[in-house]
Image (cartoon, rainbow, N blue to C red):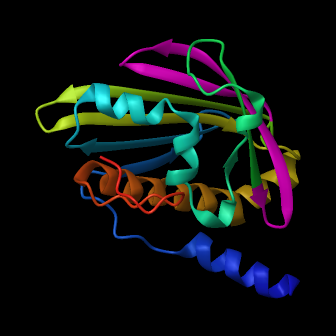
Amino acid sequence: MGTERGRELIVHITEKYDLPPTFQIRFEKPDRHTYLLRTSQVIAIPVEKAFSFFEKPENLSEITPDWLNFRFDSKCGQSETFEGAEFDYTIRWFFIKLKWHTKISEYRRPKLFTDVQVKGPYVMWEHLHTFEPVPEGTLMRDAVTYRIPFDRIGKIFYRLIIQKQLQNIFSYRAVRIAEWADGTFKSKLTAHVHK
């Protein structure tokens, strides 16, 4: 059974999506220990509406691939986003269930917010979300600065697995965001379409 789940995970990592035409993804390495993931996507939704969707932590599981088993822990009693707000999640990486605790370090509605990992699988994770009005609706950008644990072994894992996983996660996310923006988004939690 372990090998079967391993194969399933490999399939998900390499899965290709029919990406929205405005979606772009880029990986950079600003220094020896730090990685930077940048994405951008234009959606035909006003900035206020886009920001409102993304600031709700419970919506993250809706736009995250199922193989990651991403869950928002509503028991933490916190679901409103503001500077200083903290949230708990769990994810499954291969067969390991991991806790992820984040904090909103910057919050300027409806322009941007930044969530940082307080405790979790990375040495550092800082995710800046920005929302900019454009004639077509909203230009959304992500800039994720992160560091991998385990030094040399971590770098090998990054090249072989982690970068592909991040590409899969953010590509899936782009598809789900496009579905939400065009009204074809089917919630994983309920059968109705979000508007």
Q: Left of 53 or right of it: where is 36?
A: right
Question: Residue visible at 55% across and 57% down?
Answer: 169
For the N terminus, give its image quadrant.
bottom right
List the single residue furthest toward the left. Answer: 135
Q: Left of 31 or right of it: where is 122?
A: right
Q: Looking at the picture, does residue 128 appear above or below residue 21?
A: above
* Residue 146 visible to the viewer: yes
User: Magenta residues: mostly which secondary structure?
Assistant: strand
| 118 within the magenta span | yes
List the single residue furthest toward the front. Answer: 191
| Residue nearest the observer in this picture, 56 or 112 | 56
Instruction: From the top left corner, tell me how far across and down residue 103 is, in percent.
Output: 68, 22
Instruction: From the top left corner, tell me how far across and down residue 104 is, in percent.
Output: 62, 20
| Residue nearest the observer in this picture, 57 or 32 | 57
Question: Residue visible at 10% across and 32% down?
Answer: 135
Place residue 3 in its image quadrant. Answer: bottom right
| 23 within the magenta span | no
Q: Looking at the picture, does residue 192 appear above or below residue 81?
A: below
| Residue nearest the observer in this picture, 49 or 159 | 49
Which residues are the magenta region? Answer: 92-119
Place residue 176 in its image quadrant. Answer: bottom left
Instruction: From the top left corner, tell me how far across and down residue 15 is, in percent.
Output: 52, 75
Instruction: From the top left corner, tell me how far across and down residue 83 is, in percent.
Output: 59, 12
**Circle count:** 0
Question: Residue visible at 67% across and 77% down?
Answer: 10
* Residue 33 visible to the viewer: no
